[in-house]
Image (cartoon, coloured by chain):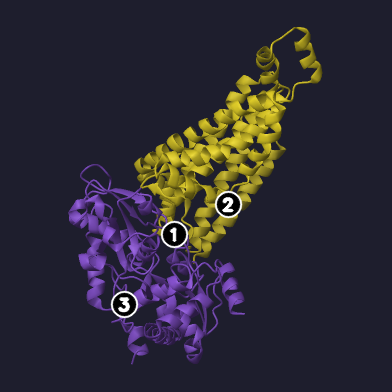
Amino acid sequence: MKLLKTLAAASLLATPALAQDDDVTLQLQWVTQAQFAGYYVALENGYYEEEGLDVTIQPGGPDIAPPQVLAGGGADVMLNWMPSALAARERGVPVVNIAQPFKSSGLMLTCWADSGIESPEDFRGKTIGVWFFGNEYPFLSWMSQLGIPTDGGDDGVTVLRQAFNVDPLLQRQADCISTMTYNEYGQVLDAGVGEDELVTFLYEEQGVSTLEDGIYVLEENLEDPAFVDKMVRFVRASMRGWKWAEENPTDAAIIVLDNDATGAQTEAHQIRMMGEIAKLTAGSDGTLDPADYQRTVDTLLAGGSDPVITAEPEGAWTHAITDLALQ
Amino acid sequence: MSGGLVLAALVVWAGGWWMNARLARMRARPGLGLAAPVVFGVTVLLMWELVVRGLNVPGAILPPPSAIGSAFVVNGGTLWEDFVQTFLKGALSGYAIGCGLAFLVALAVDRSGFLKRGLLPIGNFVAALPIIGMAPIFVMWFGFGWQSKAAVVAVMCFFPMLVNTVQGLAAADRMQADLMRTYAASPWQTLAKLKLPAAGPFIFNGLKICTTLALIGAIVAEFFGSPTLGMGFRISTQVGRLALDVVWAVILVAALAGSAFYGLVTLLERAATFWHPSQRGR
């Protein structure tokens, strides 16, 4: 039944969510995996049900832009990286962050140690794989802060548009690739590469990390008290799910696997992912830390030639929901 | 919401309908053949603009044509670089390699029944390979540059061209071939004087099919890894940035390039096979 529901949700991607009182459609920003364990746990353990919510979780994918789904009425609430959400806001899709379950960022660059890269200055003249589709902003901002051009040459980096796999590194088509601590980095290790052969740069440690996997809704919906009430319950149940997942990583990974309609995920990979995800959600009760928000905005505003956002955003986040949800 | 604009769209629609109905009843005159499609196109664009503005459709869902036009002008330099990378380097070189090889293989297949029975099924098999299966593999083999896109295009073009050319070379009548034989013509003379001219329309048919395939192949292959330019790269990254006006501007470039390429091959066909019944009376 659950499988049917997920399939139905996936096939109804383009249809507007039915605006019934307690139906919530959540648009994930990627495929079903432990990165979203908290929501699946809340669904499976009945936390949403206890709050009187009927939640549908729509998996994303490489060609699904959550802000677009939200703008088109295909979902009530979405998960998104803040750079992409702020860019969408500037593009006329006014999304607002209502909760931030992830305290820290899992984004990192993974490089071959034998490429001679020891510090970010060594990126000059090298080839780096970067994800686009809204995930390129942190990298471009970081490079422009370092003053390294991204259009190739001996002095700049040559950027490849990397697909969501680690082949360019293994094939040595790139000296560095983008990886998430909880996903692709493990895939590199699984391919038989030793950690000592790699050099990693965590965006978090470089001071250029941007907030990931926040919960966003459309601004106009926040004027509706019924919707706000629904979101308060949704955030409360979701955070319960997250804290349960942090404490029971193995069980949470199994719940995610049970909800994976594609059958593409493996148990070992999901358990490891959950362990890494737990490190990122630890230290957040769901409330957005304004200092983290400011760091994200400052990083993006330093975006140089092709800025992600051109002006300091106004009203891009609110504590209204979390204040009520986490009393 | 602005009802006035939506109403205006309906008026434009009725007006366009009326004009085209009048045009359809007119007697044929030079230049009239173009009038009806132009009226239709302008009507669609005007309605699109008015409806999108009237219903306040967000730009992230469907931008109005005016926004697309200004994105086309503002990003002219970028779009040109993308066009050079994807079309001139990726699509055209792949097209030349794919169609050229297919033509040579077709000549060999025509001479040998052995090859015909062995190669055509393999060609069928290759034709059935999905592009999204091949593209990532070719990116792995030939790198992220335009070379991997050219390889995808070459594979996509190879088979339609091969089938059409083989079919064309078999188009000459038995009787005509017998006549060449009575003249003691060598196989090469028969090929040059009889078979190739007879195959002309078929060969151009293959070339025309491949123009569309080449453009599609080059753009889609860029979704699986590319440097930071190219039409496919631009489409996929700008969708992620919700810059749908730029995405549509790239689609406009693709439409213009595709139509021009197809038109060029059609003109070549007219020049080369003017004698053929399919081209006479135009």
Q: Colour of chain A?
A: purple
Viewer can see residue A312 = no
> Which residue position is annotated with label 3?
A279
Horizontal arrangement in the rendering, residue A101 relative to residue B87 (left or right): left
Q: Tell me the subunit letter for badge 2.
A: B
Residue type (three-letter) at the residue carrying disc 1 = Gly
Q: Chain of mark 3?
A: A
- Is the residue marked by circle 3 packed among few (<14), some (14-19), or many (20+) residues within 10 Å? some
Which residue is situated farthest in the top direction here?
B183
The tag on residue B12 is 2
Front in this rendered view, residue B64 or B158 = B158
In the rendered image, residue B197, in percent from the top left (x then y), is placed at 67, 19
Q: Give how far apart the Cα atoms at labels 1 and 3 are.
A: 38 Å
| Tags 2 and 1 on a common chain | yes
Instruction: Tell me which residue sits at (39%, 72%) in the image.
Output: A273
Q: Out of B258 and B36, give the one closest to the viewer.
A: B258
A100 up-or-down from B17: above or below: below
Residues behind callouts 3 and 2 on a single chain: no
- Residue that appears at 37% across and 40% down: B81
Q: Secondary structure at mark 3?
A: helix
Q: Is residue A165 above or below residue B94?
A: below
Q: Which mark is residue B59?
A: 1
